[in-house]
Amino acid sequence: MAYLEWTENLSVGIPRMDAHHRRLIELINLLFDAMQGDASRVVETVLGNLLDYTRYHFAEEEKILAACGYPDLEEHRRTHRDMVGEVAAMESRTLTQPGSVSPSEMLDFLSRWLMQHIIGKDLRYRPYAEGHLDIG
């Protein structure tokens, strides 16, 4: 059972980016499940997946935004770098101090990112991307 579900109001107008955002929701739901039991392994798994995911997703998104002439691309890149830095710091903390990142901390982080980044920032590029669906 999904705790968060993808809805069309989250769509940024690029099918490939929407699929990436669906993956984030899957990771959030995995954390919800982890909070019901022994979560230490799940946190490590989610952090590793999330770091790979963010690097891949952000690189793809930035290519698309460059191709469609998105005027706030540099600000968007800065936000991406900050996010990757936060995930890398959590992963490093988990590796040096196992159990130091709780599922609730990860869940708060991912939920905040979902709300602030996807809804607050990514939806801003939709008008630019919609005319360039061939790149998504």
Image (spheres, rainbow, N blue to C red):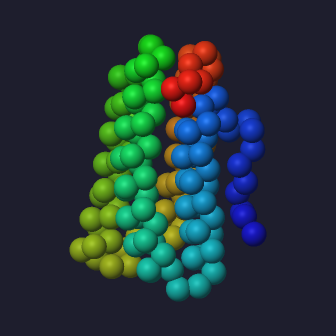
For the point 31% across and 56% down, which residue is it?
88
Farthest left residue? 96
Q: Up-down: is 110 above or below 31?
A: above
Res 76 visible: no
Against 87, residue 78 (above or below) is above
Q: Position of residue 86 (x, y in %)?
A: 35, 51
| Residue at position x 44%, y 80% in the image | 41
Residue 42 is left or right of residue 98, and the answer is right
Quadrant housing residue 75: top left
Looking at the image, is 80 positioned above or below residue 47? above
Q: How many marks?
A: 0
Where residue 69 sits in the image (x, y, percent)? 45, 14
Q: Residue at x 35, y 23 (%)?
A: 74
One can see residue 69 in this view: yes
Q: Quadrant of the N terminus?
A: bottom right
Q: Of 51 and 56, which appears nearest the observer? A: 56
In this rendered view, identify the residue nearer to me: 116 or 129: 129
Q: Quadrant of residue 62?
A: top left
Q: Who is closer to the viewer here, 134 or 14?
A: 134
Res. 33 image quadrant: bottom right
Residue 21's spot in the image, x, y percent?
57, 46
Quarter of the rendering occupied by the C terminus: top right
Q: Where is residue 13? Give x, y as percent.
A: 64, 29
> Residue at horizontal 38%, vertical 64%?
48
| Residue that protrudes farthest toward the front in the picture | 134
